[in-house]
Image (cartoon, rainbow, N blue to C red):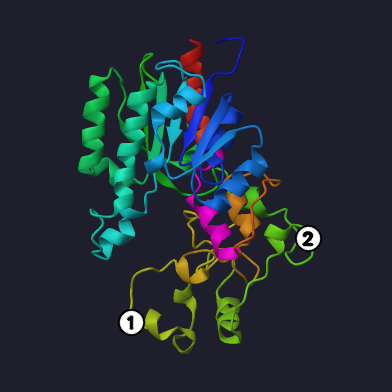
């Protein structure tokens, strides 16, 4: 183990944020599983040596995959996965959307199934905080404890581990090799640390940064009136406020600006739309670009994202990713335990 990189598999791998974080920590990611063509294209471009099983995980047999990878139960060092979490989102709960029956919720049991088949030395599952209180996680916890795994779901804020955004997430690390300590907290990284050095979008040569936004003149005017460096729509005179905003006291971050010396809000799939949250640039009269969103997710400047299906789909990939730096901090603790 000391002379070679431990092996990992990335389930629900998306555009590759988890894989990037695992590799950064020192793991050899040997396979990923993803069914979205755009995410697969992005993943393979950035991780060309990783074998990708381009399939719906519900139709993929874990034992067949294990055999194809020439592994036996107990041999895999780490199994990581971020099952789709939209069904557990707090916004759906607040809006009284029936989230319990969302079929995506049961994909956490597919992760359980793969753990039971592969019997990895360590596993890491990421999801939204609401899952920690859901009955499904209690079932998973009970079954995996009976399989000899110790550890339990815990909540972490990515901003405390070097990611320049507030992002509260549940991370469940289970181990058959002894306890895995929590990573040490780091000094916060700000919006300025992540994006202040970028050129103005339009002619930068980076398609992700230069992708144009379309706004009506009326919306452009409202954006220009919002105070720089952390201002919000509440500062607008009444005649400039949208009618829907006058009727609602909540969601104050909508049409808000980020603040240079603070972390960003959670980067979501709506991160390039100011009507979805505090996604306006601290100074420029525009929303953040796709590249700025990716940097705030802690992707490196040269990470490639497919724009084949437009700006919205690219934003969805970026917003749904497990921030690589966040992954790396936890994966590093797993690596230390494996080498110990």
Work out how far the residue at label 2 is from the one at label 1, CA to CA, in angstroms. Answer: 40 Å
Q: Residue at x 41, y 38 (%)?
A: 60
Q: Is residue 314 left or right of residue 76?
A: right
On whether residue 316 falls in the magenta region, the answer is yes
Picture coordinates of residue 272, whole percent (x, y): 56, 64
Q: Is residue 182 left or right of residue 304?
A: left
Picture coordinates of residue 224, whole percent (x, y): 60, 78
On whether residue 96 falls in the magenta region, the answer is no
Nearer to the camera, 202 or 118: 118
For disc 1, the neighbor class at 10 Å (few under 14, some 14 to 19, many from 20) is few
Label 2 SS: loop
In which quadrant will I find the N terminus?
Answer: top right
Relative to residue 2, is residue 309 depicted above or below? below
Q: Quadrant of residue 116?
A: top left
Is residue 181 visible in the rendered structure shown here?
A: no
Point out which mark residue 204 bears: 2
Label 1 SS: loop
Q: Which stretch did the figure color magenta?
A: 311-326
Nearer to the camera, 165 or 229: 165
Q: Which residue is mark 1?
A: 247
Picture coordinates of residue 309, whole percent (x, y): 59, 62
Is residue 324 visible in the rendered structure shown here?
A: yes
């Amino acid at each position: 183990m000391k002379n070679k990189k431990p092996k990992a598999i990335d389930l629900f791998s998306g555009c590759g944020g988890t894989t990037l974080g695992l590799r950064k920590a020192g793991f050899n990611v040997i396979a990923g599983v993803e069914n979205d063509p755009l995410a697969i294209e992005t993943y393979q471009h950035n991780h060309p040596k990783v074998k990708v099983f381009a399939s719906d995980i519900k139709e993929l047999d874990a034992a067949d995959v294990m055999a194809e990878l020439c592994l036996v139960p107990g041999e895999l060092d780490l199994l990581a996965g971020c099952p789709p979490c939209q069904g557990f989102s707090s916004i759906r709960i607040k809006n009284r959307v029936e989230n319990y029956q969302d079929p995506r919720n049961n994909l956490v049991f597919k992760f359980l199934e793969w753990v039971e088949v592969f019997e990895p030395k360590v596993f890491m599952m990421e999801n939204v905080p609401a899952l920690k209180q859901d009955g499904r996680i209690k079932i998973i916890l009970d079954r995996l404890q009976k399989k000899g795994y110790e550890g339990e779901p815990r909540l972490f804020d990515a901003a405390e581990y070097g990611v320049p955004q507030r992002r509260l997430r549940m991370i469940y690390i289970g181990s058959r090799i002894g306890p895995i300590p929590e990573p040490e907290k780091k000094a916060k990284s700000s919006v300025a640390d992540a994006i202040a050095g970028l050129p103005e979008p339009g002619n930068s040569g980076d398609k992700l940064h230069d992708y144009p936004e379309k706004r009506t003149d009326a919306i452009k005017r409202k954006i220009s009136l919002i105070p720089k460096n952390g201002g919000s729509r509440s500062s607008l005179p009444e005649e400039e406020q949208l009618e829907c905003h006058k009727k609602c006291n909540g969601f104050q971050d909508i049409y808000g600006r980020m603040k240079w010396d603070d972390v960003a809000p959670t980067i979501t799939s709506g991160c390039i739309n100011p009507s979805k949250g505090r996604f306006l640039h601290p100074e420029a009269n525009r929303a953040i670009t796709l590249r700025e969103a990716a940097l705030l997710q802690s992707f490196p400047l040269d990470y490639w994202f497919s724009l084949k299906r437009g700006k919205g789909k690219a934003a969805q990939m970026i917003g749904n990713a497990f921030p690589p730096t966040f992954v790396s901090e936890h994966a590093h603790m797993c690596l230390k335990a494996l080498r110990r």
